[in-house]
Image (cartoon, rainbow, N blue to C red):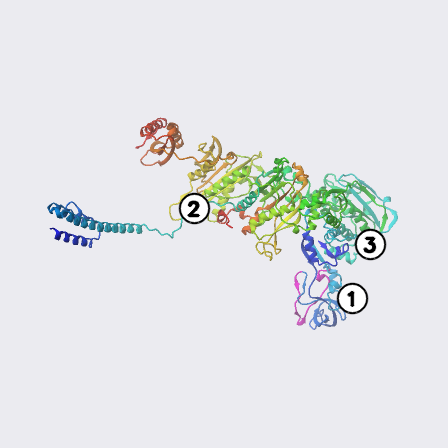
Amino acid sequence: MYNKELQNLLEEVNKCFENINSLKDLEELHTFYMGKNGKITQINQLIKEVPNEEKREFGMKVNEIRTIFNESYENKKNSFLDEELNKKLINEAIDITLPATKISIGAPNILEKLIETVEEVFMSMGYDVVDGPEIEEDKFNFEMLNIPKGHPARDAQDTFYIEGEELLLRSQTSPVQVRTMLEGKGEVPIRMICPGKTYRRDDDDATHSHQFMQIEGLLVDKNISLSDLKGTIDVIVKKLFGESIETRFRPSYYQFTEPSVEVDISCFNCKGEGCNICKNTGWITVAGAGVVHPNVLKMSGYDPEEWSGFAFGFGAERMAMLKYGINDIRAFYNTDLRESRPFDREEVE
Amino acid sequence: MISLEWVQDYIDISDQDLRELAVKITKAGINIEKIISNDIKNLVIGEIVKCENHPDSDHLHVCDVNIGNKVIQIVCGAPNVRDGLKVIVSLPGAILPGNFEIKKSKIRGVESNGMICALFELGLEEKTEENYNKGIHELDSEAPVGEDPIKYLGLNQTLYELDIHKHRNNDCYYHIGFAYEIGAILNRKVILPKDDYKEDKDSIKKYFELKVETDKCPYYLAKMVKNITIKESPEFIKKRLIAAGMRPINNVVDISNYVMLEYGQPTHFFDKDKLGNKILVRNAKDNESVITLDGKKRVLNSNDIVITDGNKPVCIAGIMGGENTEVDENTKTILIESAIFDAVSIRNTANRLDLKSEASIRYGKGLNYEYTEKAINRACHLLEKYADATILSDSVNYDKIDKTLKHVIFKSEEVNKILGINISEDDMKVELNRLGFDFTLNDDKFDVIIPNRRLDIDPYVNDIAEEIGRLYGYHNLVSTLPKVGIRRGKYIGDVKYRKIISKRLRSLGLNEVKSYTLVSPNMANSFNYRNKSQIALPNPMSIDKSVIRTTLLPSLYNVYQYNKSRKINDVLIYEISKTYDKDYNEESLISGLLTGNYLSNGWTIPTKVDFYLVKGIVEDILNYMGFKNRYSFERLNDSNFHPGISAKVLLDKKEIGIIGRIHPKISKDEVYVFEISLNELMKSVKALKFKAANIYPSMEKDMAFIIDKNLESINIVNEIKKLGGKILKEVNVFDVYMGDKLDNDKKSIAYNLLFEDDSKTLTEDEVMKVFNNIIEGIEKKFNAILRDK
């Protein structure tokens, strides 16, 4: 009984999705079969008329038809929804080649970049980074560095004086050596560097600047030698210019160091072959340095019988010009942002 | 300039390659900048074997010249060219002074394969009319054809151009001193030149009285010579002076210069007959004047030293002689002065008079008193030999010089410790001998006497270490690291704060700038919102760099304009630098300038820089430094800034800086700046500590008020906070409205309030009670109207 109807309905259900092309048609179809008066719902009503012994089989068959319909319905529905979503997403497509929104951190001044690199190396070797006043007293800038009034070394520095000879714009960062030693009271060892602004009466051009930065260094401890200075300078120049760089000391003269040396590094550009940068000598002068003069130690409260040390001074501009290939010293102070922006990153070795 | 041929008189360097020697000397500390040699390639001795008139000229000759391996044809215009003459020939390829290259050529149609030369054409003689008229140089008949003529003439010269450090420029600027330096390097002895002469019975004492009335002349020595003949100097003196860059004048003047180049000691020759019988050395009187040898009138003051004849000045001591006692062609009797003057005084006088003479340069560096006598004797020796002089016996002198010997006592290990090397006592002895330092050795203690010629050496073991070190060779030092404790260095004091804030500003997108401390007065006074008085330099180089700035804003504005002129429109910059005011107060300032877009891609609406962005940056710095809830902003009234868009920044009610848009009269573009005092922020930042988030839910409520347009939001916020009590955690503005829906003088601000309790979940009733209380309070206090919820 009703087998025929069931059979027909099954066949109908199997075919009924074939011409469904929209979600709306699909929903109508759903109502047509599964709604309150839907065909499948209706046929299930007939169970009342089915003899008891056949009810179970009838029920199973109806269920089977319902399952088949539902599965097809769900599949169809999902495919319609997917299609619709895809259409929407495709509409949302953007031109991924249009320019990005620029996000960036700011860059340090190029000199500062170099100085930070140097500071990092020296701090790792136990040097503190200190600063001192830019308006200095004669006694710190000259006298306590073994440069008494009337000494010719003063003429060479062409100092900007502010009040007589007593107050001046510091012509070197070396007064910070004196200040640091005075603070140490002759009792504690010292390791410090001082990168700072200095001033001399130079006309500004591509290689001269009336304002420039020195990187001063001072170590005072026990049994410190010129060879220790050489080893220390080795560390910093290798960090800045490469592991293959060699250091050479040449005899020189500064009032506050004895012995004094001029520090040359082997030319990183031509590796000693001779080029423009090293003026065909294979060597480039980068710093002045030496063993701290016993007089300077004494004047600042350190007993030269007990303490010894070394000091050095690099020209920050010169180092940065060499390291980054800058030809005009004014580039540091004019700040064309197109030039300074690329320095916003760390160097990865 | 040092002539090696000259140095050879005092030390044997005949076996040395002069280029290698220069390297050795440079390594030991005297920098040889340049080696100048008068070697000219392609010069040969030739013999004229045929000399005929040029067919097309009345003064040219066509010569066949035998140059050893062949005979070549040369056209020559010299009047003295003739058959059989031995001459100097420069062949094609020779480059003569002035970069003049000899080439094959045709002269009036006749082939010429070189040039027959005069000495001045080879730079071996001065180019004078007289020398020009002499024509080509005639070699003697013994001259070997085909050989190098310069060598044959003994005129081959090598000169070292020195760049020496200040401390060595007194002992290495003269030939004997330089010979000592070579002696130390090569371990050879120096032989001093002859300075003997016959003395007349007649004594100077009969003629001269010397008086010194200044402490700036510790040593004065004079000798007298008579019967001199003024004539040309011998060849070797002329040649050497030319090589050293001095012009030969006559035998007497040349001898004075020659001795100076030997010993570094200037001597001055007075014409005794013009001078009279007295020398008085004293400080000059103010406004006293003298006409110097160059014919110029020099006005002196009491800081200068003068040599007088008892009354009038006859010489500015150590600088230049006076015209009134000048040696001339009729001079017969000379007084020779060899003295020591105060170096600083000489430098100051020379600078003030702008008169740098050979003498003043040397006196200004300081001189070795021992050489005053050596130089005067050497001058007498040469005057006797080359000016027929009779030297009077005795000398007059004044001697107050400090002759204390400089001793250094040390052990060899002290030197080793300074240098970080290990040389034995015996090697140390060798080194000291090389240097020519006298010493004794007792119980492993050296007692070294520093020779007076080494004015640069002070009596410290460090100075000895330097001398030993430079001869040992700094290139032989082994790199070691100091044996010191391990620690990591720190940023100290204000450096620490500068670094922290600098990094923070960079992370916020601002670029660091370094600009000049010295600015023009105009610049210093623009943006002088604090009315600071500045320090003006008494002697600036230029007006542009004459004042020490008290604010960084003008400098940043300059950098902005520099970039703007290069079409860079988004400028986000900062600088942290020290400033000084008239009372020398040092203040570090943090300044920023922002204009253009903060975030953009060029084709969507960008985040433009505005007041609130700059305020955000300032607040971020203040929060970062731990000043949350302690700062506030008040309207600023300053002509440099937009009157409605600028504010003072206050910390604990104290003004620490400003923010604002630059006044449109100054900049049409919207340019924003801030400047705050770093000094005020130098408090240590609190250590980082984790704080767990509140686990009880928070509740948010909104309220909006219509208020007077001029009422600043901060007043409402402060009142809300006061009324909100403990459970009110945050008040945020989420809308500001002014426009059609409101009266002109009104605005509406909407606030979002966040309520939270750390210990329990808040109930609606609890919150509403507070919320309503706030509304009531605000309405009452500010005459505000609550907008629809």
**Which residue lies under the disc numbered 3?**
B387
Q: Residues within 10 Å of mark 3 (few under 14, many from 20)?
A: many
Please indicate whether residue B626 sits to the left or right of residue B149 in the image: left
**In magenta segment, residue B111:** yes
Q: Along the line of sight, which residue is nearer the eye, B708 or B774?
A: B774
Judged from the image, the secondary structure of the residue bearing numbered disc 2 is loop
**Can residue B704 be seen by looking at this rendering?**
yes
Please indicate whether residue B256 sits to the left or right of residue B744 in the image: right
**Can residue A288 be seen by looking at this rendering?**
no
Residue mark closest to the camera, 1 vs 3: 1
Q: Position of residue A124 (x, y in %)?
A: 55, 43
In the image, the segment drawn in magenta is B98-124
Residue A94 vertical position relative to residue A123 in the rendered view, above or below? below
Give the CA separation, mark 1 to mark 3. Answer: 27 Å
Q: Along the line of sight, which residue is nearer the eye, B693 or B569?
A: B693
**Chain letter, disc 3 residue:** B
The label shown at residue B164 is: none
**Which residue lies under the disc numbered 1?**
B140
Give the CA separation, mark 2 to mark 1. Answer: 86 Å
**Chain letter, disc 1 residue:** B
Q: Position of residue A228 (x, y in %)?
A: 63, 46
Residue B491 vertical position relative to residue A28 in the rendered view, above or below? above
Q: Residues within 10 Å of mark 2 (few under 14, many from 20)?
A: few
Q: Along the line of sight, which residue is nearer the eye, B709 or A36?
A: A36
Judged from the image, the secondary structure of the residue bearing numbered disc 1 is loop
**Which residue lies under the disc numbered 2?**
A103
